[in-house]
Amino acid sequence: MSASKRLLYIANHRVFWTSIWRRKVTTWSPVGAAFNAKPLRRLESFDKNVADFVKVAHPDPSFRDAAEKTCIEIGTVVEKLNTNVDLCRSLKNLLDEKKVLDQLDPETRKVAELFMFDFEISGIHLDEKQRKEAVKLHVQLLDLSNKFLMGSHLPNRIAKSAIPEHIHRHFATEGSYVQIGGLHAESSDDLVREIAYRIFLYPNADMMDCLDDLLKCRNKLAKLVGYESYAHRALQGTMAKTPGNMLPSLSTELMPWDPPYFSGVLRAERYNIEPSLYSPFFSLGSCMEGLNNLFTQLYGVSLNSEHPSAGEVWNEDVHKLVVVHETEGLLGYIYCDFFQRADKPHQDCHFTIRGGRQCQESGQYQLPVVVLMLSLPHPTKSAPTLLTPGMMENLFHEMGHAMHSMLGRTRYQHITGTRCSTDFAEVPSILMEFFAADYRVVNQFARHYQTGQPLPQNMVTRLCESKKVCGAADTQLQIFYSALDQIYHGEPQNRSTTDILKDTQQKFYGLPYIPNTAWQLRFGHLIGYGAKYYSYLMSRAVASMVWKQCFVKDPLNRDMGERYRREMLAHGGGKEPMLMVEGMLQRRPSIDDFVEALVSDLNPDFETFIMDSTS
């Protein structure tokens, strides 16, 4: 097909689909139209050797396996470098030379201090034998972490004859077995939820041994390099600094498999928030247009859709966004891998493919490249991709990570964008959830994909209030997870991880432990967030304070957007996280401020509740 014919085909194809979907809708901006257009099957051949991405997203399993092995090999090399005495000595000489140190800009000095910090927590002060032991423990941890993470997602199976026949249809089958790969927490059938909970969380001896070995290895490494526990080592350089205290629990007669379902029922019944009522207003294109408008007003940044080159992306439905500032020009690239497909993880996440940095050779800035992964449904013949409120919020959340990467302008790749303290990294993404829940923002883009009707304000208000239903229980669950994580990584205890779980659940959570279950074996966050799971709560508290103090009066205020970029987004990990928070809030928050921020988010708007009750 000639280039001219191909362009004509594309144009006609887009006109056809958008004419069906738009009807009375005002014309979308280019970025909105791009995401609401039915994905085009690219006419060029799809080459396997597409992009250096992808232990997670690559369609070829052999590439994913090779990438996983490469990650372990790179990790091993990094740990060997972190115990290299000559490298450390060179860096120490620089840091000890006050005259030289004073000539360094703050960011370079911070990076040098971070490298020295890596040397210290890796055991550079140990003798050669102990340093080799530290590297060996790191390699063991990489293997154990990979094994645990893979195992935590595997389904459990049970003979069909062991469970009632009428519920077989709820689970995948394999011969004479049913496979249970999740908790089925949203099921309205009590028995389905209970059986899924008991079987999916049934203890696996190999996984139990893996977790024991993982925790022992982490503790041994921490003790070897001079820390009281792995938690003390992990929290160095964070906002928390040291393992903290947790909060008390409540009591209830529910069973552990009940809260997600019943909280959903309560939300739906009290506030009438059936997702199907909202989805027609949240087409993917309209949501992307809303993000584009928000970023333009806050930062002077626009999102522009660009057709990828042949072989540039790993799947034909991946969109490429070019991020441009109104005066600074090109900022970076975002690849949007948004749609469901076989062998793709069902998780929303952000990947840094290439970090931003100042190139000494050319004097130019290396532009960041990131990937956002979601699991959205594909468009149909009659409608574009329609998002539930939860999907819309997740899209805003992940785009918060992407803009952290795009708007950071650090000199070094080591500290670019989201490469910062774990308990700060979620602040930009959680803050975006507050924007996604504000009617002044939502009203700019939420239009019915067929009629163009705006989403009524009372529907947005009800949706926001519904999130507070059982909010205290949800927060308490996060506190329980955080406490368990800290205890696992604290001083070793001569008892099983299940016994620790049982006691911690009784102390910090109101629901009973179910015998012969081992929820901790499904707690994949123990790998990426070991001793740092609390970060979600701390980041939420910071985001809440930033929203209420800086944006709640006017979420589209350009001056405040510029301050947010300058004080919090620009530095990546190049500045102490608490100093960034202090710069934004213009005060240093206390622990009481963090707690108050979390609690105040749970307070219901009684005026809204009474208004809805009487209408």
Image (cartoon, rainbow, N blue to C red):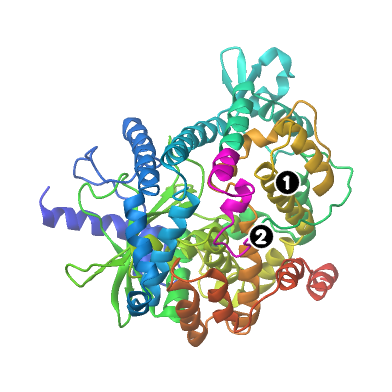
Q: Is residue 607 left or right of residue 458?
A: right
Q: Earlier in the sequence, mark 2 or mark 1?
A: 1
* Circle on res. 537: 2
337 or 332: nearer the viewer: 332
Query: Would you say residue 424 sits in the magenta stretch?
Result: no
Relative side of 36 to 231, left or right: left
Q: Amino acid at mark 2?
A: Leu
Q: Decide: few, some or many residues near mark 1? Use Cα within 10 Å; few <14, some 14-19, many ≥20.
A: some
The residue at 61%/12% (across/down) is 176
Q: Is residue 203 above or below residue 270?
A: above
Q: Is residue 416 visible?
A: no
Q: Give the percent coordinates (x, y) of residue 439.
A: 61, 74
Picture coordinates of residue 412 (x, y %)? 33, 65
Vertical position of residue 481 compared to residue 306: above or below: above
Q: CA distance from mark 2 to mark 1?
A: 19 Å
- Residue nearer the viewer, 377 or 103: 103
Please say whether residue 142 is visible from this viewpoint: yes
- Give the image quarter of residue 200: top right
Identified at 36% across, 74% down, the residue is 101
Which amino acid is tagged 1? Answer: Pro
- Foreground label between 2 and 1: 2
Q: Is residue 234 magenta?
A: yes
**Start and end of the magenta stretch?**
218-241
Q: Which residue does the numbered mark 1 point to in the structure image?
A: 260
Q: Residue furthest bottom?
A: 559
